[in-house]
Amino acid sequence: MTNKEFKKLKDDLWLAANKLRADSDLKSNDYSPPVLGIIFLKFADIKYSKFEKEILAEYDKKKGTRLEEPVEKIAIEKCGLYIPDKSRYEYLKELSADKEIDKALIAAMKGIEKYVTSLKDTLPKDEFFGITRKGQTLLKQLLKLFSTIPDDSEGDLLGKIYEFFLEKFGLDEAQKGGEFFTPTSVVNLMVEYIEPYHGKIFDPACGSGGMFVQSNNFINRHHLTKGNISPISVYGQEKTLQTVNLAKMNLAINGLRGEIKRGDSYAEDLYDSFGKFDFVMANPPFNVKEVNEDTVKNQKRFTEFGFPKSKTKKKKGGVVNIPNANYLWISLFATSLSEKGKAALVMANSASDAGHSEYDIRKTLVRKGLINAMLTLPSNMFSTVTLPATLWFFDREKQIGDFEKHKNKIEILFVDTRNVYHQIDRAHREFTAEQLQNLATIKRLQKGDRKFFIELVHSHYTQAFDKLPVLHDTLKQAAGQLQTQLTAFTGWCKAQKPNKEQKEITDKEKLFEKLTALEVADTKPVLMQLQNAIAAFDAYSNKYSATKIEASNEQQHALLKQCETVLHNYLLMKKELEKNYREYEKLHKLADDNLKAKDDKAWKELNRPKEIRLLLDKLNEYSNTQKNNNYEDEEKSPVYFIKMAEWLQQRFPLAQYEDVTGLCKLASIADIEDQDYSLNPGRYVGVVIEEDGLTEEEFEETLIGYNKELSTLNNESNDIENLIVNNFKLLFQDENS
């Protein structure tokens, strides 16, 4: 689903929510179940439709033979779902408003649950009665509304939609530290770091199941699935029934095998998790207060590496409470791993430096060699919580027994991504797909995977040069049209015979003087450079081989050098062209307001500056150095992709891992001991003073501009001061006279 389609889907959802609020008796926290139930039906129908021909073909093939099977059994085997006729979305959508649509929807849900046992007692049913107090019309409208969801929808859309509901409705649950939904870009980064492509995956705070879905998407991206069956089994635990049901729906839509159970992860070990799972991933609630010590103190999964004790033994009502549950979650992750297991969790930044008994647990985990990476996230990545967060990564295979004997094997990769993000709006950030892959490359390089680096740089350049011809042609068109319009406009101006009043205005504004001085920037040299760069990329592509690391890296750096020169010249040229256009636009408006006659046919035949503006806007769209905040389709800017390649090549010029100030540091046990076992990445990676990106000429021009602006403001200030003094004198002169 494209950004444009997803934006429309969210707008439709909000429209639906407003309908619910206006036309039903539901409370705010009851809005989502019936709406999400209808969305589930639509998504389930989409998925089933993709397999329907294959299902029916196999059914017909086996029909009448001793191998004959019920169609529902074949459907479950092939896509994990069977949708009976009266549960199909089109059937429900076509029901007239005078029918009992609420009962039909309940029957549809029961029809699916009958065959998909993992969804038994999960789908919303009685909730539909709440929105039919005033009749069936609203349900009819909702079914029609969500029928607009594109048939190619896939992925973790249910989770995204649920996050959207939490954010829009401001539910109390939304403030519990990302308990329900972790942003997709964060989950993707976790997945890229631990690569959960097989085995059993556990999430003890699974929310809507987003971790599982993104793990499955990772498998699909890397073509690791054999047939229609995912190579992973998922096991989730969540304490809230509504969220458990949502997770089950999410798994069913995405064809994932496994279980989601309702339970309190502190008190209930529903999967006997100690040493059991190949991968553990979660975004547990941060800084939970007042966990009963008696509930957890006798569970090995929480005590294997130490126990977070209360700083005081003072009891409240006879109960000793643990003041902060962060290290209970950290211990649970470490103890749930099998011998080669890996884990990734989201945790509050404060846990990286926590003291007292938490310090002892952290020190033990480090000295056991279990923690292999720490990554600080930018702020405002979560729409439901503003706390800064850090990703913790564990690798049980790296665990050591004798610290003194094997301590030199202990290494932790620290990564600080606080300056790597895409600003969606004032309050929200995310990683773009390209930023995410760049950050994943750090871990790949640290593991010695140089081929991944070369392939990613190549991918960035390929996307850039696929789009660069459009930029070249748009620049040529914009400059050409500006020159054509300026020539025609100049000819028109010279043909005019202004009257006295018009002449006074044009002389005052120096129209003819400015018009004579205005010259369109010569774009030919830059256009030639762009053509040469495209030819250079074609030559590079013909030689490219991801297995020839050194040669490819050298060629990519040569390409980068050429791109940097071209981009520098192009961006200066574009800036000059914009300046030319603005001057032309001002002169055109001046003539339009003061020089043209009422019925001037020659004027009407002139093209308008707006046509050039549209081309320049398109040029800007293809010249963004960062993701466009308002983009609706996929990213179009070749400049952006070149900058993504440049980001990697500048930081890892040899196509191999190295410490980068302000970004990453591979710390030894000696480094960690020097920092007294703090796991705050900022302590290790250091700080880099970012350059402003301006050339010497641009900096000088900017500084001169600031100085002129200051002089103007000073003059205005003096004028205002003199005006006040004069008015003051006049005021008292009037009183004295």
Image: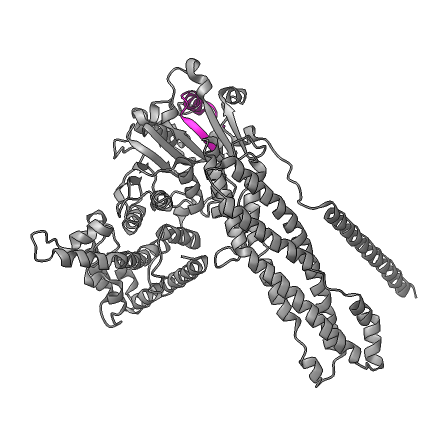
Residue farthest toward the bottom in the current orientation of the protein: 599
- Count the labels in the image: 0
Of residues 184 and 58, the one drawn nearer to the viewer in this rendering: 58
The residue lying at 79 percent from left, 77 percent from top is: 494
Q: Is residue 509 found left or right of 158 in the rendered image?
A: right
Point out the image quarter for the C terminus.
Answer: bottom right
Q: Choose top left, top right, bottom left or bottom right for residue 86.
A: bottom left
The residue lying at 30 percent from left, 69 percent from top is: 137
Point out the image quarter for the N terminus.
Answer: bottom left
Q: Position of residue 340 (x, y in %)?
A: 33, 28
Q: Choose top left, top right, bottom left or bottom right for residue 367.
A: top left
Q: Position of residue 268 (x, y in %)?
A: 27, 34
Of residues 283 and 83, the one drawn nearer to the viewer in this rendering: 83
Residue farthest toward the right in the current orientation of the protein: 737
Residue 53 is inside the magenta segment: no
Q: Position of residue 203 (x, y in %)?
A: 33, 38
Q: Is residue 82 found left or right of 486 in the rendered image?
A: left
Q: Which residues are magenta?
A: 353-374
Residue 354 is inside the magenta segment: yes
Q: Position of residue 601 (x, y in %)?
A: 69, 84
Q: In the figure, 311 relative to 478: above or below?
A: above
**Residue 316 shows in this picture:** no
The residue lying at 74 percent from left, 45 percent from top is: 696
**Residue 223 shows in this picture:** yes
Of residues 305 and 226, the one drawn nearer to the viewer in this rendering: 226
Q: Is residue 20 found left or right of 412 in the rendered image?
A: left
- Image coloring type: one colour
